[in-house]
Image: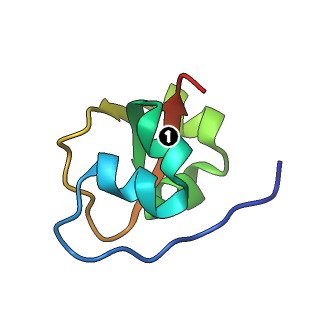
């Protein structure tokens, strides 16, 4: 899809807390986050291409979100 949303979070927030900024149910069901730098995502043209170029990595709850990160939150909900 060509649809994306952005949420502002404070510096130093971990992936689990970032999921909570979207919705509490997403935070409660958090499994892990797929993380790619936005510049890499744009250069690759799609998330699928970024995955095939090894620009996407899996991170756990404790990962501190960096400026420019694009996250896909995996949940069990």
Q: In percent of the image, x 49 and y 40: which residue is there?
A: 73
* x 51%, y 72%: residue: 7
Residue for badge 1: 73
Image vertical order of residue 62 relative to residue 67, above or below: above
Placement of 6 over or under 70, stated as above or below: below
**Residue 19: % across, % down:** 43, 51
Secondary structure under badge 1?
A: strand
Q: Is residue 44 above or below residue 50?
A: below
The answer to whether one can see residue 28 in this image is: yes
The residue most toward the top is 76
Tell me which corner region of the image, top left, top right, bottom left or bottom right, holds residue 60: top left
Q: Report the coloring of the rendering.
A: rainbow
**Picture quadrant where residue 66 is located:** bottom left
Q: Is residue 64 left or right of residue 58?
A: left
The x and y percentages for residue 41 are 53, 53
38 or 28, nearer to the observer? 28
Q: Residues within 10 Å of mark 1 (few under 14, many from 20)?
A: many
Picture quarter with the C terminus: top right
| Left or right of 62, for residue 49 | right
Along the horizontal axis of the image, is 50 left or right of 15? right
**At which x and y percent is residue 27?**
43, 44
Of residues 53 and 69, which is closer to you in this image? 69
Q: How many marks?
A: 1
Residue placed furthest toward the right: 1
**How far across and how far down the image is residue 76, in percent?**
54, 22
Q: Is residue 55 in view from this perspective? A: no
At horizontal 39% and vertical 44% (from top left) the residue drawn is 35
């Amino acid at each position: 899809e060509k649809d994306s949303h952005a949420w502002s979070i404070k510096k130093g927030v971990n992936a689990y807390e970032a999921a909570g900024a979207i919705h509490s149910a997403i935070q409660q069901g958090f499994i892990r986050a797929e993380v790619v730098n936005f510049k890499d995502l744009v250069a690759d043209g799609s998330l699928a291409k970024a995955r095939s170029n090894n620009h996407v990595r899996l991170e756990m709850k404790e990962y501190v979100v960096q400026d420019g990160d694009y996250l896909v939150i995996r949940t069990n909900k």
